[in-house]
């Protein structure tokens, strides 16, 4: 599990960061009667999580190579 920590932390950070930012920036300015596509919001959050997981993977590999 130690070698997957960067990927897991990156995914969780990207997913929750996107959802929090979406709530703070967009949902406060959208009236309640407007419809949102929740599936697209979740899909965008997952894609953002995957992007951050990749960044975490690259960072973890860089740090491991630097230690050796």
Image (cartoon, helix red, strand yellow):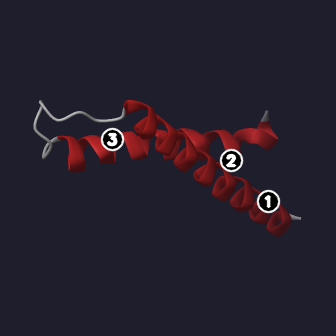
**Separation of marks 3 and 1 at Cα, in angstroms:** 28 Å
Do callouts 3 and 2 mark residues in contact (Cβ within 8 Å)? no
Query: Which residue is denoted by mark 1 in the rendering?
Result: 61
Q: Which element is circle 2 on?
A: helix
Question: Where's residue 46, x and y in %?
Answer: 55, 40
Image marks 1 and 2: residues in contact by CB distance under 8 Å: yes
Q: Is residue 18 left or right of residue 8?
A: left
Q: In this view, does 24 lie to the left or right of 17?
A: left
Residue 25 horizontal side relative to residue 3, left or right: left
Above or below: residue 13 compared with residue 65: above
In the picture, which quadrant includes the N terminus? top right
Residue depicted at 26% across the width and 40% down the height: 23
Q: Quadrant of the C terminus?
A: bottom right
Mark whose residue sits in front, 3 or 1: 3
The 10 Å Cα crowd at callout 3, few under 14, some 14 to 19, many 20 or more, is few
In the orientation shown, which residue stands out farthest toward the bottom?
66
Q: Which of marks 3 and 1 is nearer the N terminus?
A: 3
Q: In this view, does 10 lie to the left or right of 37?
A: right
Disc 3, SS: helix
The residue lying at 12 percent from left, 46 percent from top is 29
Q: Which residue is drawn at 48% across and 45% down?
A: 44
Residue 19 image position (x, y, % from top left): 37, 40
Residue 22 position within the rendered picture, expressed as x and y whole percent measured from the top left = 31, 45
**Residue indicated by mark 2:** 6
Residue identifier under label 3: 20
Disc 3 to disc 2, how far (Cα)? 21 Å
Residue 24 screen position, x and y as percent:
22, 45
Label 2 crowd bin: few (<14), some (14–19), many (20+), radius 10 Å: many
Of callouts 3 and 2, which one flags the residue occurring earlier in the amino acid sequence?
2
**Label 1, label 2: how many angstroms apart (C-alpha)?**
9 Å
């Amino acid at each position: 599990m130690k070698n997957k920590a960067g990927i897991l932390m990156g995914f969780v950070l990207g997913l929750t960061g996107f959802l929090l930012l979406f709530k703070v920036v967009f949902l406060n300015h959208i009236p309640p009667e407007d419809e949102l596509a929740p599936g697209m919001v979740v899909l965008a959050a997952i894609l953002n999580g995957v992007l951050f997981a990749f960044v975490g993977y690259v960072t973890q590999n860089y740090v491991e190579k630097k230690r050796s």
